[in-house]
Amino acid sequence: MAESQCCCHLERTTSVDPQKTTAVFLLKEPALMWSLQNSPGLRMGPLIPEQDYERLEDCDPDRDCDNNQDSPLPGEDQEPLLHVPEGLRGSWHHIQNLDSFFTMLYNYHQRNGFACMFLEDVFQLGQFVFIVTFTTFLLRCVDYDVLFANRPVNHTQPGAPGFHQTPRIFHNKVTLSDAILPAAQCAQRVRSSSFLIFLLLLASGFWLFRLLRSLCNLLNYWDIRTFYREALYIPPEDVSKVPWAEIQSRLLALQRGGGLCVLPRPLTELDVHHRILRYPNYLVALANKGLLPARCPLPWGGSATFLSQGLALNLDLLFFRGPISLFRGSWALPNTYKRNCQRRALATRLRRTLLLLALANLALCPLVLAWQGLHAFFSYAELLRREPGALGMRRWSRLARLQLRHFNELPHELRARLARAYRPAARYLQVAAPPAPLLALLARHTGFFAGALLAVLLVLTVYDEDVLAVGHVLTTVTGLGVALTVARCFIPEEELLGRSPKSLLQAALAHMHYLPEEPGPISETNTYHKMSQLLQYKAVSLLEELLSPVLTPLALLFWFRPRALEFIDFFRHFTVDVAGVGDVCSFALMDVKRHGHPQWLSAGQTEASVSQRAEDGKTELSLMRFSLAHPRWRPPGHSSRFLEQLRGRVQQDAALWAATPVRSPPTPGQGPSFLNDSTTSSPETLLASLLLLPFLPSRELSPVAPCPAAATASLLASISGSTSQAGHDQSCVSPGGPGVRNPALLSELASAEMSLHAIYLHELHQQQQQEQWGETSATPLPRIWPSPQRPLTPEDETLIWHSDGTSSSSSSPRQQWGPTGASNLPLGGWQEEGKVQKEPELSPSSG
């Protein structure tokens, strides 16, 4: 049969609509084929340009579009023709959403296969039942007067059989069975409370909803399990052993080999990431432009941020999922949100939706608050008794997971990177904390007294356990333990004394890739406070979640509702239609020309106005990380030239450092043997060995040496030279290639290279800022490797991005977002211009 040798024939009836795209999986077995069909600090504020939505189409560029609307393509209303063998119609399900399919592939791997997912769902359902039933039992089935010995209990024992004796009465200790009411009396007390019956019915309905959702998900994941086994040749027991990069490579190889046909073009790594991270990329961009998180000014100065799990769930319902969301389906933003003329009507509708959502949160606040309290109590009570200092530890906040996340970075990649950054960041917060010698003195002596009392009580308890029966002894022991743990938090650790905060901050930067910074001279106090918001105490995080039912409706009313027009404009201006993928965030394309920042080495490569630039070098660093993580991916146009420019700048700075007297970088033969070092077990270990090389100077974040970035450049050149020994490309931005013999070590090299790139770009950025402020006394680092000066060709001027790196022409006007005439524009800064040149005297459209 012809279909067994090649992909089945598909009649393509649409060219760009991703929901009309058909994916057909042709497995290796001749009689097995699976077909899948797709159906239908605030930087932004008022600076939002007035301009129409820009669509990227894979069609005739000369086609005219009326009224800036998306014109239907020929045959768009028809369904693609599929060939499905008769014997497989009942065994395979048509997946209607490629976003859902790729997301399930990823979640199946991250949750370690079907068995672990099944048990996790069962335990979560069981945990919900346990909390509800156990709470009901504690409320209605326990006699607390007996339990607290407020009422004596007589235990009687009848006399021996055959003898007329009165029962003997024993007064013993109260047992748990004495405090538990009989089943009949317990049931009667439950039925006597109508409010409790209502809550139990509500909890039962919610549990049934979760049960049905889990069953539907498990049925879908069973098909994913079969796809892993039959198409990717990964048995269930090996899912947790294969890295996601390997699974993605097999998926793309399957498509290239004809086993997976996806029209209109081949899949790339960026396509997969766009579908999995369609919505998270929007959230990262919202945080980068200052619309997230919610902020509240404090009376004593500064502001408090709020972004809890409950608020994140509300934003997901508001923007992406649910009947009230902006997106319709999973991939398309309605055309009404892409037109300038309806922005104010849509903003009014969004304000009304936010008001209703806030009122719903207020109505559910008592129930959610009670649930949050119960769940926190059952989760942390025993932990606090065993480890009183557990809440004094730090963890990355939800804000950090947004601000420190790259575009197109998967959750497991972010977790691994932040895990490597945790230790140096936590040590920096310990060393850089404002000195408080008086507080440390009080804490040291308070800890001594609390420890002495606790030791005596523990010794008495070991000697005679009846000491615990004395009133409030156990409470005293717990309180002393907590006081001792809190006192230790204010006592500085001796091994950290003398450590440089800047060196620790740079070690954290190597893995964080972003630093909280403000324009102007670097303030150590501000940096410390911002870092403490990113890496916050567990107690603060727990308190934020407990108060989330109260604070979430307030945030919806007083932060998001007044900014409804800004959110509408954000989605209108930063949404593009990628052929075969759908509507995605334009920042996720990592387009240096569209969203680059001149102060992050993209000068001459970017045409972005002030409001179009991604802050903190997000575009440049995201592009660099993605190219290093996926060496086979070929970036398009301006992004490729930016990477070439970066490589040339690194080589030039490395040559400058090599010419410096006394100091010179290690050559591949003299430097550390990266590829033969079997003891290197993590990127952090490898990077630490690089940063401690003897030729490096004393490194600081604020460059005071003549050429601090050149030392980092020499390290990058050293890594590139070492990897070239294994047959790799010498490009510092593409560490992968053929001839790889140790994939694990090469992955560590890529991670270490990205860390050095982050340090290198931050050093260049700070040098450029200091030169702009006129505060540096050192000689500026000469720019020997110039930016390309060739004029842009007409093809470059009309470059349109696709996720595979191809381009097509477009007649859409370029976006201009600048301060010109800001006071006369809606929201102060959005404008539309039909010309490439900036013309300040041009009157903006009012929209």
Image: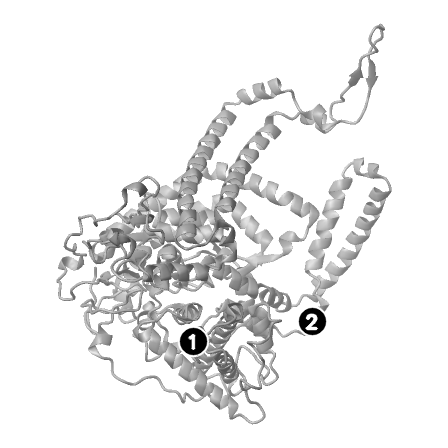
| Mark 2 element type | loop
Task: Please report contact status of discs 2 and 1: CB closer than 8 Å, yes or no.
Answer: no
- Mark sitting on residue 601: none
User: The residue under label 1 is which amino acid type?
Assistant: Val
Q: Which residue is labeled 2 in the image?
A: 497
Q: Quadrant of the C terminus?
A: bottom left
- Residue 677 % position (x, y): 60, 75
Q: Residue at x 32, y 63 (%)?
A: 586
Q: Is residue 214 left or right of residue 377?
A: left
User: The residue under label 2 is which amino acid type?
Assistant: Leu
For residue 247, above or below residue 542: below
Which of label 2 and label 1 is nearer to you? Answer: 1
| Mark 1 element type | loop
Q: Please, which colouring scheme is shown?
A: one colour
Q: Residue at x 55, y 76 (%)?
A: 675
- Mark sitting on residue 733: 1
Work out whether mark 2 precedes mark 1 in sequence or the reverse, and give the earlier one.
2
Observer able to see residue 333: no
Q: How many marks?
A: 2
Q: Is residue 837 left or right of residue 275?
A: left
Picture quadrant where residue 687 is located:
bottom right
